[in-house]
Amino acid sequence: VDNTAPTASLRRTADRWVVSVRDNLSPVARAEWSRDGHEWTALAPTDGLLDGREETFEFPADSGRHMVVVRVVDRQHNRATVGAVEE
């Protein structure tokens, strides 16, 4: 039984945000991001396949001051959320 949420980290590299997700037991099932509380947008893994316990995602950075939030879910529906201030 997997009751543990995945771990997620968020870092900015120039004009992109990079999300790294790891789960010890279950594959990552979904990742989404939102800026300033707007609509959630699905993320596609950088390797093209959402099939592993470790996944990397990217999405574009924006100019100005914003709040960026990413939420991830594993196949057992455990969730994690990570956020950062975009400047």
Image (spheres, rainbow, N blue to C red):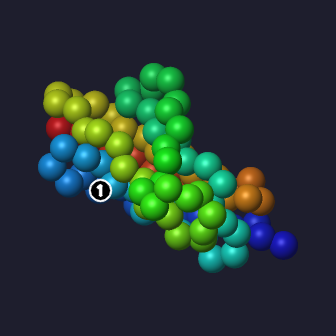
Could you say which is closer to the camera, residue 73 or residue 50? 50
Q: Is residue 20 above or below residue 25?
A: above
Q: Quadrant of the C terminus?
A: top left
Q: Residue at x 69, y 75 (%)?
A: 25
Could you say which is closer to the camera, residue 29 or residue 8? 29
Q: Is residue 63 above or below residue 17?
A: above
- In screen coordinates, is 74 left or right of 63? right
Image x and y of residue 62, in percent? 22, 32
Q: Quadrant of the N terminus?
A: bottom right
Q: Is residue 45 above or below residue 71?
A: below
Q: Residue furthest front?
A: 48
Image x and y of residue 45, in percent? 48, 54
Image x and y of residue 76, in percent? 77, 59
Q: Residue at x 40, y 46 (%)?
A: 83
Residue at disc 1, secondary structure: strand
- In screen coordinates, is 67 left or right of 70? left
Residue wearing tag 1: 11
Q: Is residue 31 above or below residue 5?
A: above
Does the image show residue 77?
A: yes
User: In the rendered structure, which amino acid carries the disc numbered 1?
Assistant: Arg
Q: Residue furthest top?
A: 38
- In screen coordinates, is 59 left or right of 76? left
Could you say which is closer to the camera, residue 64 or residue 50? 50
Determine crowd level at label 1: few under 14, some 14-19, many 20+ residues with C-alpha closer than 10 A: few
Does the image show residue 5?
A: no
Q: Residue at x 38, y 27 (%)?
A: 36
- In screen coordinates, is 42 left or right of 67? right
Q: Residue furthest bottom?
A: 24
Q: Residue at x 50, y 56 (%)?
A: 48
